[in-house]
Amino acid sequence: MRQTTFIVWFLIFLIWAVYRANVFLPEWIDELFIKPLIFVVPVFYIVLAREKKKISDLGLKPKLKDFFLDLFLGVNIGIILALEGLVVNYFKYGLFSFDPILSVKVSGGIIFFLILTFFTSLWEEILGRGFLYQRILKESNNQLHAAVVSSFLFLLLHIPIAFTKLNLIGWSFVTYPLSIMLLGITNCYIFSLRKSLTLPILIHLFWNMTVALYL
């Protein structure tokens, strides 16, 4: 299982890195079509075709009775994690710049941005926590090891965008990856606690929104 997990991750990383470096399509195409094709289709193939398991084994089993608690926790934890976005913003611009917020309004509005961010969070949590973390945890039987390793692999998937679109320099190039690692490790533990991707997706959504606005 470990070999298959890392092979799948490496192929996804390689394809995504090449795509990011050479193809520049509108963000909505990337998030709604390209990212699920690269991040999720291989995972679904392994789970459904190779392992003969159900999609719900990835944590895609929302519980309606827990939704409002998940929403409450997601907002609050997401806000705490998103404070790091302010740190990144400050070190990048030398002050708190609201230019990224204005650019969101110009490029489609907050609602459109929310939709894109939700799907980004969904695809990335399926791969990061539902696939990578669960398999590394099962293989190692060590939660800290699985959380750190899967979160580091998750972080590496974000390196191409740091060089292409975000143009991170100085301290922001340090705080951005640290923020992603913190998000990943937090969501790993929450996923183990809740046995569902609902809350990790919500946390990722609110964190991603705020960080993106301040980058």
Image (cartoon, rainbow, N blue to C red):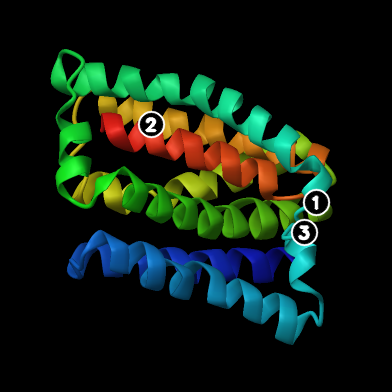
The quadrant holding residue 54 is bottom right
Residue kind at label 1, given as amino acid type: Lys
Residue kind at label 3, given as amino acid type: Lys
Residue 6, horizontal then vertical, whole percent: 60, 63
Which of these two is toward me, 82 or 23? 82
Give me the disc on residue 63: 1
Label 1's element? loop
At x 58%, y 70%, the residue is: 7
At x 45%, y 55%, the residue is: 120
Residue 58, horizontal then vertical, whole percent: 73, 62
Residue kind at label 2, given as amino acid type: Thr
**Which circle's residue, 3 or 2, is located before the other in the chain?**
3
Which of these two is toward me, 97 or 11? 97
At x 74%, y 71%, the residue is: 55
Q: From this viewpoint, is residue 41 visible?
A: yes
Q: Measured along the vertical axis of the image, is residue 4 above or below residue 159? A: below
